[in-house]
Amino acid sequence: MKIAKRISRLGTETAFEVLAEVNDLRSKGKDIIALSIGEPACATAEYIKDAAKKALNKNLTHYNPSAGIPEFRKVIAEYVASTRGIPVEPDEVVVVPGGKPVIFYSILACIEEGDEVIYPLPGYPIYESMINFAGGTPVPLRLREDRKFSFDIRDLRSKISDRTRMVIVNSPHNPTGGIIPKHDLHEIAELALKHDFWVLSDEIYSRIIYEGKAESISQFPGMKERTIILDGHSKTYAMTGWRVGYGVMPKQLAQHVARLVTNSVSCTATFTQYAAMEAVLGSQESVAEMVEVFKKNRDLIVAGLNGIDGFFCHTPAGAFYAYPNVTRACRRLGFKNSKDLQKFLLYKAGVAVLGQQCFGTRTKDEDQEYIRLSYVSSQQDITGALRRIESTLADTRLVEEFLDERHVKETEFK
Ligand SMILES: Cc1ncc(COP(=O)(O)O)c(C=O)c1O
C-alpha cells in the first residue's frame, strides 16, 4: 500500500530508540545504568496524585473543551503572568497533552511551504522534524561551546532572510543545559520586530535553573504579540507520563491551535488537568527539593566528567543534562564520532548516554563531538556510571574488541 510522501519528511526522537535498546539489554539480564532519559526520576508529588484520584472519584472523566478546562486555563494564565511578568488572558492559553504538541501545532499553524525556520543546533530533535514535515526549510543556528552554549547574535543575524517566518529558542536548553542571557533575548526580540517573525520560546525547563531566574523573550515590548510560549508539567512536576502541557500565544492563533486539537486528540484528559491545576496551586516545596537534588547531581557529574581523560564539561546553568565535549577521547580511541562512543559505553560499560547525532543533523563545519548525560538518577548511579565510563575507556582490550566488532558489522553491510 502507498504511504503519503510527507511521512518521509518526518524525523524522530532517537532517545526513544536508545530506551528500547536499554530495555532489550535489561531483559537479557544486562546491568545498565541509564543516563539517557530526559525525565525526572522522582515520583509525582502525593498532593498532585491525590488531586487526580479526587477528580476520578468525582467522575471527571468526560470530554472537556479542546483548549482546556476554563479554570485550568485561568490558573495557567495567572501563573505565566506572574513568572514572566506579562499580562496573560485565559483565552491566550491552549492546554495540550504535553509540551511537544505545542511544537507540532504551532509549526503546522504558522509555517508554510518554503518558509524558513531558525532553530538551535544541537537542539531538541522535534524542531527539525516538524519544520521539515510542515514543508518549511530548517535553518540551524549553532550554539557555541565557548559562549556556554548560547549563540552568537551575529550568527543569528546572518541567518535571517526575507523568508524567515519563525525563530525557535530554548532556554534552559536541552541538551546542553545552557541559558540564553537576557541581553541576547533582547536582541532577538529586536530582530523579531524588525523582520516580523514568530518566536517559539520553549520554556519547558523554566523552573529547573540553578542560578537566578529563567528569562522569557515574551517580556520585551511588542513580543507578546509574536511569541508562542511552550511550557508544561512534565519536567517541573515530574509528570512526563501524565501528558500535560500548554502554549501561551495570541488569541487568534490560540483559536487555530485549539481547532488542531479538536481535529487530532479532541482535548487533554480531564482528570489530569484537575491534578495539574492543583500542582500549580499547591505547595511548590517538591519542586524546590527536586531542583536542590539536581544541583548536587550536577556538581557531582561535572566534576567526574572533567576528571576523565579526553572529556571537558561546562557547568550547566539549567535543565538536567551535562553535555561534555568528548572530541579528544574519540580521536584518541579511534572512534569515528560520538555515536561510536554512545555504542561503546552502552555495550561495553553498561552506561546509556546519547551522542550528539540525537540532537539534530550535523552541519559540514561541525568537527567537535559531544554526548548528553542526564543527571536525574541517584548519586549512587551517577558515581557508578562515572566509574564504569572511566575504567572501560582506559581498557585497551575492550576498545580494540569494540573497534573489531564495528569493523565486522561495517564490512557485513557493504
Ligand atoms: C526542549 C524540550 N521541549 C519540549 C519537550 C517535550 O516535553 P513533553 O514531554 O512535555 O512533551 C522536551 C522533552 O524532553 C524538551 O526537552
Image: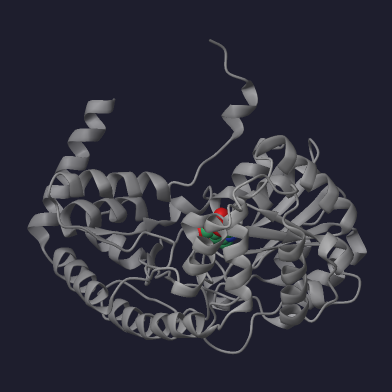
Task: Indicate which quadrant contains ligand 1.
Answer: bottom right
The way the protein has been coloured in the rendering is one colour
Quadrant of the image occupied by residue 114? top right
Residue at (54% x, 49% y) in the render: 364
Residue at (57% x, 65% y) in the render: 275
The answer to whether residue 141 is left or right of residue 312 is right
Q: Residue furthest bottom?
A: 212
Q: Residue 180: image x %, image y %?
A: 65, 76
Q: Residue 268: image x %, image y %?
A: 64, 50
Q: Nearer the viewer, residue 332 or 146?
A: 146
Q: Nearer the viewer, residue 401 or 105?
A: 105
Residue at (49% x, 59% y) in the render: 240
Q: Residue 278: image x %, image y %?
A: 60, 71
Quadrant of the image occupied by residue 413? top left
Residue at (81% x, 77% y) in the render: 219
Q: Residue furthest front?
A: 58
Total number of numbered labels?
A: 0
The answer to whether residue 157 is left or right of residue 301 is right
Q: Nearer the viewer, residue 217 or 188?
A: 217
Q: Is residue 90 above or below residue 61?
A: below
Q: Nearer the viewer, residue 66 or 13?
A: 66
Q: Residue 357: image x %, image y %?
A: 44, 51
Residue 121 in view (yes/no): no
Quadrant of the image occupied by residue 200? bottom right
Q: Is residue 112 above or below residue 283?
A: above
Q: Residue furthest left?
A: 397
